[in-house]
Image (spheres, rainbow, N blue to C red):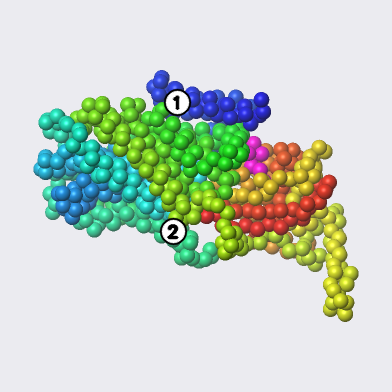
Amino acid sequence: MSADARLLLYALAAVVALIVLIARFKLHPFVVLIVVSLALGAAAGMPLANVVKAFQDGVAGILGLIAIVVALGTMLGKLMAESGAATRIATTLIARFGERRVHWALMFVGFIVGIPVFFQVGFVLLIPLVFTIARRSGLSLVKIGIPLVAGLSVVHGMVPPHPAATLGVIAYHADLGRTIGYAILVGLPTAALAGPIYATWISPRISLPAGNPVAEQFTGGNGGMALDVMPSFGISIFTVLLPVLLMLGASAGDVTLDQPSALRAGLDFLGGPIVALLVALLFAFWALGYRRHFTRDQLLKFANDCLAPTATILLVIGAGGGFNRVLIESGVGKAIADVAIGSRASPLLLAWTIAALIRIATGSATVAMTTSAGIVAPIAAVMPGASPELLVLATGAGSLVLSHVNDSGFWLIKEFFNMTVPQTLKTWTVTETIIGVAGLGFTLLLGLLVGCTPRATATRGGGLTAQGWVDVTATLDPATTPVYEGDAPMKFDFLKDMRKGDKLTLSVYSMGAHSGTHIDAPMHFIATGAPVEQLKLDPLIGLARVIVIPDSVQAITAAELNKHDWRGVQRVLFRTRSTSHDWMDSVSFHRDFAYVAPDAAQLLADAGVVLVGVDYISAEQFGAPAPRTHQILLGRGIPIVEGLDLRPVQAGDYDLIVLPLKVRGHEGAPARAIMRKSS
């Protein structure tokens, strides 16, 4: 059995173990994720200390953002509930839509109010309003309640800044603002199908008991607050949409403004999820707190009270991040990616299917999103045409499908609506399944409309163009190109020159194989390594991440590497002091160039990276006693591109094409490299 096949079996066993331990033995997902992650890493042959370190790094990497987002969003939702802003939005929309279309109004209420709050919080907040409308209008509780939970559920699973959707944004390295925009386009028709349209059809077929004990006894939120005491509709809706508007503004700036623009930098700062939610929360403290005459003690109590229930969610998300990291560093992610690429499976369908299977088995949308994103992210990084934003939506849709008796939400709906289990299956379970299937369908349709899914090769008049590509190849010039100490000097001459009266111009070049921008093949330091003409195209073409290393850093160690967001991609390029000082345009050889230390090289190799690039003519420390960095990377078959001119690019993800001259039987060759900002 091959090594990749063995890793795939381990991954399958890990997922099955997750499902069985959570669904059958009722163990807490947090504990199960830790146990399964450590077991997977050990079985895959990782050193035990590295397994624990990988899991810790994964938890830290995920919670560094998610914990702050959850805390800020929860406090914002709590303040909206206590101030009556959420109720004001609900009552205003219902009044505008009218009683005959109240089920449509409640769908929009769930969609809007659900943006800053968890599903359970939004449900408990708004259910008194549903009971009141049902009693006053005589409409079926199913007809008006199902649209509400459909709106809440769609937002919960597919729209950032909700934790599960934000986790998908991080895993797939998606653009946050574009994800929100796409999620709204996909989410609204999905919620309409699963909510008011389906509820209108199913409600006559569901007969509920005349009395509902929960409806009679339940009081919560501020559903009974007088209208003249609540904040205005304008302030309420502005507060809940403020973080969304800031995030969309950042994405719009990325598309329309130049990279160096101060305005773009400001929009990116304000549009980050942490700052956007913080701005909205501070505004809410003023508009919904102090202006509504809440005291400081009351506001502090609201903030403290709402944070405790988020602990379990954060622990599960963090453990899921640890599981993802172990998948990547054990080599499982690369093995899965290789199989998926060979099978030509659609990453959107793959993400949806894996998420749906885990959701059905465990009942947890968060576990489904976390696990499936970790499995699919390495595949998406190397597959052409896989839009990260659409992958977030496809995974989110799959994580909502077919809620049944192993989902706490199933029992929440059953008890509050006073339904039997069969009735809950016919209403809530079908609603969630419609959301999952329709969400995938609209995501695939959107992919065709915006050009983000793979299509047939373009014919005349279309296809690949030079637009957006930048050349990151260092110019070869004996007067300005540095030559590594001891390497062959560069000599360019003309055998014939039309400027001197010849009939043609004919040049001759003499230089080393490692001049300017070039690629080191394994043969360079590995006796049995492949020569440059045998390099496969896969590592040389695909998504690459540019990591900016501070000028003060000369040794890129594992500790320095882990300060940056480098995991989850297969090609890593380092932009260092060499770029800042224009050393690839300086004929003098600089011994103090930044280099990749052996421990960082080992970390990159163990994580499944397939290409490493640097912005000077060597990745190895000058004067190192042994070429360990080259030996580690080239020994794993990882080519190294050296001498890149990264001045035209900043930190971020780029499409990369770097192709060496096809020189038979030699260890390296000059190369041409081009990049464009990844969409």
- Helix, strand or loop at label 1? It is helix
Query: Closer to the N terminus: mark 2 or mark 1?
Result: 1
Q: Is residue 165 toward the left or the right of residue 658 in the image?
A: left
Image quadrant assignment for residue 75:
top left
Q: Nearer the viewer, mark 2 or mark 1?
A: 1
Residue ID at (77%, 63%) = 476
Residue at the spot x=18%, y=55% of the render?
Answer: 96
Measured as percent of width and height from the top left, residue 413 is found at: 25, 33
- From the image, tell me which residue sits under label 2: 250
**Which residue is denoted by mark 1 in the rendering?**
19
The one of 191 and 265 positioned closer to us in this rendering: 191
Can the viewer see residue 136?
yes
Q: Say above or below: 191 vs 399.
A: below
Q: Position of residue 194 (x, y in %)?
A: 30, 42
Around disc 1, counting alpha carbons within 10 Å, would you say few (fewer than 14), some (14 to 19), or many (20 or more)? many
Residue 298 in view: no
